[in-house]
Amino acid sequence: MDKPVYVTQSTLPPLEEYTACLKNIFESHQLTNHGPHVARLERNLAGYLDSPALLAVSNGTLGLQLAIRHLGWKGKKVITTPFTYVATVSALLWEGCEPVFADIDPDTLCISPDRIREQLQEHSDVAGILPVHVFGNACDVAAIGALAAERGISVLYDAAHAFGSRLNGKSLFAHGDLAVGSFHSTKLFHTIEGGCIVSQKPEDMAALGLLRAFGHIGEHHISPGINAKMSEAHAAMGLCLLPRIDELIRRRATRTGLYDRLLLHRFPCRLKTIKLAPGLEWNHAYYPLLFEHEETVLKVSASLGAANIHPRRYFHPALTNLPYLKKQSAPLAESAASRILCLPLWPDMEDKIVEEVAEIVGKSL
Ligand SMILES: *Cc1c(COP(=O)(O)O)cnc(C)c1O
């Protein structure tokens, strides 16, 4: 490849559409502090995500931190998955929580409810569960909800990959006490940097809104807050992309279909991908491939690298190996992390790039 091919390419709207929004912002002189673009984006996102209440925030990591505070988990034990991006766990650590890892289901790569049950038996003092809808696949929300209800603890979903995925017709964001999205520019829907917190209870929003903006309303100081506001220029990017989202997902699906034909169907014994949850309309956020052995991953990565193609080992290493955490055991997450490779994928990716990637992967096998 003449130009490097990365794991993804950020989606951009036509420049004129974005500059038209920026022109409005310039004319209004309101650049941030809950301006009309943020308000409109929040309303439109709440509709798209089947959520009665939604707050836009400056990024997904701060969204997780605000949600953790709001749920009263600060300083407590929280069960989470070791197979995720590090931000899931670093958000817990910044809030002084102790992550307790429950291993994953080796087929879906999402946290296993059976392993959660074991950790709940082991630890009587767990404050909540933080599962991740990995690669846009759905966690077993029914089983996780039942375990949490039994123990009387709360569930916060890291829904950073879940935008556009629907389970039995409803957005994945509609599950859990709270769900947090990331609108980072590498994600399926983005605001350059950004994120959201979704709740099923509109009464949560006042307290979360205070946490997001310094904990005061005018001169009335209520609680210690932080600054996690989204700016008008960021919201404008979201407003330009949101109407295109279903089309973007359709185009991703065409690319993943081509990868399936060129790779999964040709090498059914040597390659696997994630098993989607029953009832899931998947958002095609990533194209994860599981190889039999780590050596194959290294070989495939090297061959792709030599052709200027740079896939990512999401999520290697498993977070049980973080040097600043007490070692815990999660053999299935560690195995998946060592054998996974996410291939390049974006909505406008040319077929010939998909074909080239597939050919190099196939040859390396
Ligand atoms: C991207 C991501 C985050 C962090 O989101 P930011 O908006 O980049 O802060 C959290 N969790 C997961 C699983 C992610 O992939």
Image (tube, rainbow, N blue to C red):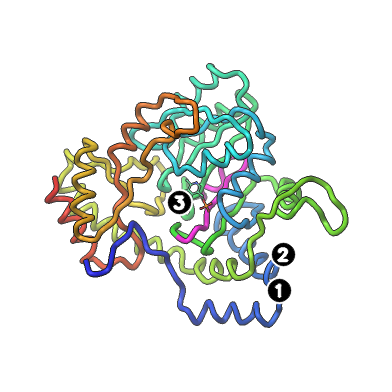
Residue occupying the far right of the picture: 219
Q: Residue at x 25, y 59 (%)?
A: 309
Above-or-below relation of 159 to 22: above
Q: Are marks 2 and 1 in contact (CB under 8 Å)?
A: yes
Q: Position of residue 13 (x, y in %)?
A: 46, 73
Q: Position of residue 181 (x, y in %)?
A: 54, 51
Residue hosting label 2: 33
* Marks 1/3: CA–CA distance: 33 Å
Q: Quadrant of residue 64?
A: top right
* Marks 2/3: CA–CA distance: 30 Å
Residue hosting label 1: 30
Q: Secondary structure at mark 2?
A: loop
Q: Residue at x 55, y 54 (%)?
A: 49
Range of the magenta residues? Answer: 171-185
Q: Position of residue 318 (x, y in %)?
A: 39, 35
Residue hosting label 3: 165
Viewer-proximal residue, 228 or 265?
A: 228
Quick one: label 3, few (<14), some, or many (20+) residues within 10 Å? many
Q: Residue at x 19, y 57 (%)?
A: 306
Which quadrant would the C terminus be assigned to in this image?
A: top left
**Numbered badge on residue 195:** none
Q: Secondary structure at mark 3?
A: loop
Which quadrant would the N terminus be assigned to in this image?
A: bottom left
Residue occupying the far front of the picture: 323
